[in-house]
Structure formats: C-alpha cells, structure tokens
Image (tube, rainbow, N blue to C red):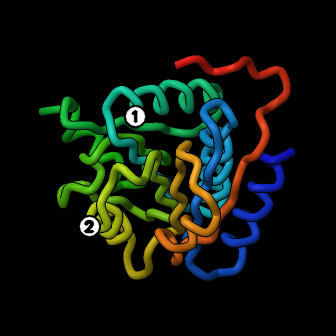
Amino acid sequence: NAQKRVLKEIRADMATGAHMNRLLQGDVGSGKTIVGLMCMLIALDNGYQSCLMAPTEILAQQHFTGISEYVEGMDIEVGFLSGSVKGKKRAALLERLKNGEIHILIGTHALIEDWVVFNKLGLAITDEQHRFGVKHRAKLWGKSKPSPPHILVMTATPIPRTLAMTLYGDLEISVIDELPPGRKEIKT
C-alpha cells in the first residue's frame, strides 16, 4: 500500500506539466526500485527516456540486472554504462542512446559525462543520492534540453522530516513506510 501511495504522489507530480523534484525514502527491501521502474515506464509511455544513476558499479549492476529481468519480454531497451564499458561497446551504446533506441540507461557517474547524450530524457533517478554532490545532480539535470527532466532521488537512509526539509527543502518527500507482504528481513 505504501508503494501504491508513493506512486500516486509521483504520478500526480509528473502529470502537472511542472518539473518534479521528489525524494523517495524507504528501508532496504521496501520496494524503491520497483517504484522507480514504474516511474520510468510512465516516462516511456509518454515518449521519454529515463536514467538511473547509482554511486557504485556494483549497485548500478544490481539495478540493471533487476530492471532488465522485470521488463524481459517487453519492447523496452535497457542499457548499462560505467567506467568499465569501453571501446566499441561504449560507442555503440552511446549512439543507440542518442538515437532514442535505449529507453532506460542505468549506470554510475559515467552518466553525467559530457559525451553522454540522450535523445529525449524525461526522468532522472539517483539512488543513494547523498553520495552525489550538487554539481553531479546538476550535470544530470542538464542532460535534458530545453527543460530539465523530472527528478526522483531515492535513499534508504532514514532522515527525520524536519531534517529532510532543511537539507532537501527543494524536494517533495515521499516515504515507503512498510515492507511489501512476505518480504524477508534484510540482514547486512
């Protein structure tokens, strides 16, 4: 139910025609990634590309694997970009991205490099966003011309609402405050 509530809040933001700037907070295992994917599908349904930037290659690869599995069998192209993607493979990926053939791009800081050009970026998601600086996020926002993409930043770090408003006063806040039914406890 919390996922549904949060998705309604995000859909309402995206439907206004104004730029969305939202923080999605939820425990590990609460379903932030699936909510992010649903938002990417909304963008895709409206003719836009999406990207998801994670702070480490391991986390980015986990997102890529999971999202690729979720959309398997659909006509959705998911790409992966990090510093380890090189040469012809990188050149082909960037060409397909620029042509709009890649619908969802998942990766690391490599997404904000100048040579990464989207055809029509409509949604930019950052995971564990506190690991990125303001300039990192601003470079990602600049990937969409003439107006910035919708922004969704996700975190599993619990932030009291008053502190969140101080740190992220420019963001609306959504909280997934329950785990999906049947979810086992996460042990780290």
Seen at 25% across and 55% down, the residue is: 116
On the picture, is 104 further left or further right than 186? Answer: left
What count of labels does the image hold?
Answer: 2
Residue 102 at least partly seen:
no
Q: Position of residue 50 (x, y in %)?
A: 49, 54
Tell me the SS state at disc 2.
Answer: helix
| Residue 56 position by quadrant | top left
Disc nearer the start of the sequence (2/1): 1
Quarter where residue 93 is shown: top left
- The image shows residue 141 at horizontal and vertical percentages of 38, 69
Name the secondary structure under disc 1.
helix
What amino acid is found at the position of numbered circle 2 in the picture?
A: Lys
Mark number displayed over residue 135: 2
Q: Which residue is mark 1?
A: 60
| Residue ID at (49%, 54%) | 125
**Mark 2 surroundings within 10 Å by alpha-carbon count, few (fewer than 14), some (14 through 19), many (20 or more):** few
Q: Quadrant of the N terminus?
A: top right
Which mark identifies residue 177? none
Q: Residue 164 sits in which quadrant?
A: bottom right
Mark pair 2, 1: CA separation: 20 Å
